[in-house]
Image (cartoon, rainbow, N blue to C red):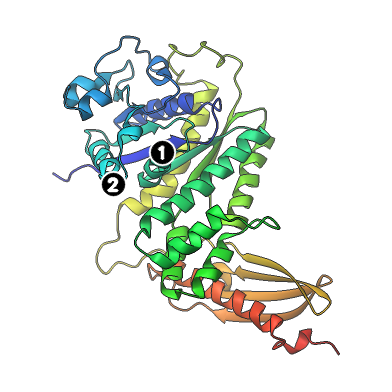
Amino acid sequence: MQSRRRNLWVIGGGKKGVGKTLVAASISMVLARMGKPAIAVDASTEGTNLQNYLGITQAGPSFADLLENRASEKDVLKNTAEPGLRLIAGASGMLGMANPQSGQRERIVRFLAGLDAEYVVVDLGAATSPHTLDFFNLCDEGILIVTPDPLSMHHAYDFVRRALYRNIQRKFASVHSVQAVLKEFVESPDASRPRTMMDFYEQLCSTDPSSADKVAALVDNYRPHILVNMASSEQDQRVAEIIQSASKKFLNVDLHSCGLILSDPGVGGTARQTVPLEPDGALAKQVRQSVQSILNRTLPEESSPAAGAERPPLTTPIMGLNHNLFVRGSALHVQTEDMGNSGKCVITQVFSDGEIVFSIKSEYPTTNTDPGTRTRLAELMRKQHFDVIRDIENGRISALRPA
């Protein structure tokens, strides 16, 4: 019999009070009701609310007891009133116990992935410590919770930024060139303007092009989900769009918006701490839509095509690159776009006073059924984009030379 793959979902964010624990409990219950056995893990440092939301009031052996060999796996797994859903409580200290040099984080992830459940849902809480960021980066699906509040939006973007740079730091820990550029970006920010991931690539390319390509591939595959909670209306979906736009512009990260949960006056304070999620209630339906959105995005990746089978074509264009320049008295905008399967090419255009003054097109480098196509397309876009910028600055594009 084929073994069942475990999926580790982590609920995170940068601010307290955005409803991460309620969302974690609700996602766990919805997965169980969809016939997907789940285990919820309370790793938040903000209390033991997850077990309260799941209707468990009696304390028992904790995850810390398990790690220190004071309890067995069976002892720490608690049944909930929801069929197919169990809970591991008291795991808030596990991130602090994870020594970066000891591989403890990876051991914890392996333990959680080896649990007898199809899905493991972890409530991380609001911390942004290196331990928390590392755990978020080690999961299968990271889900960022944000509310329509400017401070929450700021913290959500900052969480993505910190998590991404932390991921690069750990994955390229032994590469001096990457660490040097990363240190400069993190410790010596440019006060005149925000530095972007494209600035990072360009600076790294000048000393270590090979590592720059590898960092670009890592970033291209870094795609957390974002869920808007406590929304007052469907218009608050704009919150996710704003954070998506900022993440793409400055970090080159494509966040996946997995849904929106409207505020419910009945879900305030302690009102829902011991009340089950109503199967036909608005909250359950909204959470189910979010869960289904994540599943739709991830399930095709869980089963690889059979040997010799044709892979599905790349259907989602890679988002573009944009730079503003001021060269020889002219304000210019350089824009590079992937035209997707309809055009099968990458186009870079230069605008001056709203008019296109230069354009260059490159055909796709390979068949779009190649599994490495996205990485190669991203590299083609970066190379073409910055080649045009250099040619402008060096006066090699005739259309931009003064008459």
Label 2 vs 1, first from the N-terminus: 2
Question: Which residue was labeled with disc 2?
Answer: 101
Up/down of 154 relative to 183, above or below? above
Residue 132 has which mark?
A: 1
Crowdedness of circle 2 by 10 Å Cα count: few (<14), some, many (20+)?
Answer: few
In the image, residue 386 lies at what x, y percent? Answer: 60, 75
Most extreme residue toward the front, as rendered? Answer: 188
The Cα–Cα distance between marks 2 and 1, rounded to whole angstroms, is 15 Å
Instruction: Residue at 53% x, 30% y: name it.
Output: 286
Q: Secondary structure at mark 2?
A: loop
Name the residue nearer the viewer: 358 or 35: 358
**Residue 49 in sight:** yes
In the image, residue 76 lies at what x, y percent? Answer: 23, 22
Name the residue nearer the viewer: 152 or 328: 328
Figure quadrant of the C terminus: bottom right
Instruction: Residue at 55% x, 25% y: name it.
Output: 17
Name the side, left or right, on which 77 lies relative to 346.
left
In the image, residue 139 lies at what x, y percent? Answer: 36, 44
Most extreme residue toward the left, as rendered? Answer: 1
In the image, residue 170 lies at what x, y percent? Answer: 37, 53
